[in-house]
Amino acid sequence: MSATLSLIVFWFAALLLLAAVLAWILPSVFRGLLARERLDRRDLNIAVYRDQYRELEEDHRNGLISDEQRDAARAELEMRLAEDALGAESEPSRPARDTRRMGFALAGVIPALACAGYLAVGEPGFIVKVAAAEEAEQERQRKMQEALQRLDGQVDQALADLEQAVRENPEDGVSWAFLANAYIARDRWEDAESAYARAYGLLPEKAVVLSGYAETIAVNAGRDLDGRPMELIRQALQIDPEDQKALELAGIHAYQNEEFTTAAYYWNQALGQMPEGSPAHAELTAMVRGARVRGHTEAFGGAGMLAAPASSISGIVEISADLAAQVQPDDIVYLFARTRGAGAPIATLSTRVDQLPVDFVIDDGLVTDPEHLLSNYESITLVARVSRDGDSRARPGDLEGALDTVDVGSRGIRLMIDTVRP
């Protein structure tokens, strides 16, 4: 509906509504005014004849008129009253005509006042704005649909061209890989797996081919990454540790197996391959944050990493027998990784006393500040602390253990909680 037509419909509906209201109100007003005018005139006539009758009786008592004269005058008054004061009016009085004029004036004034009030305090262009917005939205949707149709046609044409290319040159592994991605765009996963199988046979050293092939196998197997998909992912990461799809899939596999620190590590690596500010970057950032939150607890116990990076530290946290009697099973144990000489930890893990002794793994996936990745340092300081109130802040009486210099890449570290903070 165009803006002009919408405006016409609005004013037409408004006028119809106003006419209905006036048709309901004005007849009642006319009837009430006319009836009141008739009653007022009759009451006045009756009052005049009553006064004349009273004067007639007063003259008779004073002896001014005889009985015969009084009776004759009384009969005349009664006849005149019956004919004039109590008789029906033969034609409308002037006040009735004035009432009609007032009604007509109201019929004109009320719409004028309503329109003036709307123009003064309302928004006359609102209907036009709404209609224009609807028209613009319809136009936007139409253009979007046309663009999608054009893109759809382009994908179909590209798919047909790729199919022709592999028919003409079946030994071109790159064309098979492109064809597989075109099938994925069409949600034809089985065809995509077959195309990637051909590409893998021709390009077994291309990491993007291996990770793409792993994805199609997993999707067609109910999104199960175990087995053959993970073998391909490992091979892809050995060839190219920065292959984005392999990193994402490795993170998904780790997360599905509740290896949250490992998932955070791989997804954090994949983030470096994405442009900042893009929807994919924001989504993966949220996934890394969620995995880190869960990993702060789950990292105690060791995350069986697919290929543990050199920039990680693993070991075990214990409590000495002398201090074990001073803690409760549900007391919180914190493990802090700090840069040497720095106050704030770059990574924090937590568990409960009843889990001790417990294994741990610290890597870049647990680091909260990307400017202080574990891989940026040669050595760090590790501090384990038992908190009776669950607060990570240090307090006198807390039980602690510390290692001042731990080389990044160390394995089998033993950190003993064996001192009481003064």
Image: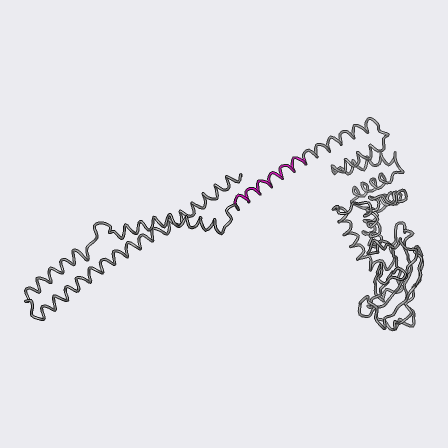
- The prevailing secondary structure element of the residues shown in magenta is helix
**Image spot of residue 335 (x, y percent):** 86, 63
Residue 179 is covered by the magenta coloring: no
Magenta residues (range): 127-148
User: Is the image coloured rainbow, by chain, by secondary structure, or in one colour?
Assistant: one colour
Q: Residue furthest front?
A: 120
Residue 236 in picture, x, y percent from top left: 87, 42
- Of residues 413 and 49, the one nearer the viewer is 49
228 or 207, nearer to the observer: 207
Residue 293 figure quarter: bottom right
Q: Which residue occupies the foreground of this view, 224 or 108? A: 108
> From the viewer's perspective, is residue 225 above or below residue 46?
above
Q: Is residue 31 left or right of residue 286?
A: left
Q: Quadrant of the C terminus?
A: bottom right
Is 130 covered by the magenta stretch?
A: yes
Q: Position of residue 356 (x, y in %)?
A: 88, 65
| Count of numbered tags | 0
Q: Residue at position x 86%, y 64% from top?
A: 355
The x and y percentages for residue 61 are 9, 71
As drawn, 82 above or below 253: below
Q: Quadrant of residue 371?
A: bottom right
Position above or below: 354 against 224:
below
- Residue nearest the observer in this picture, 17 or 370: 370
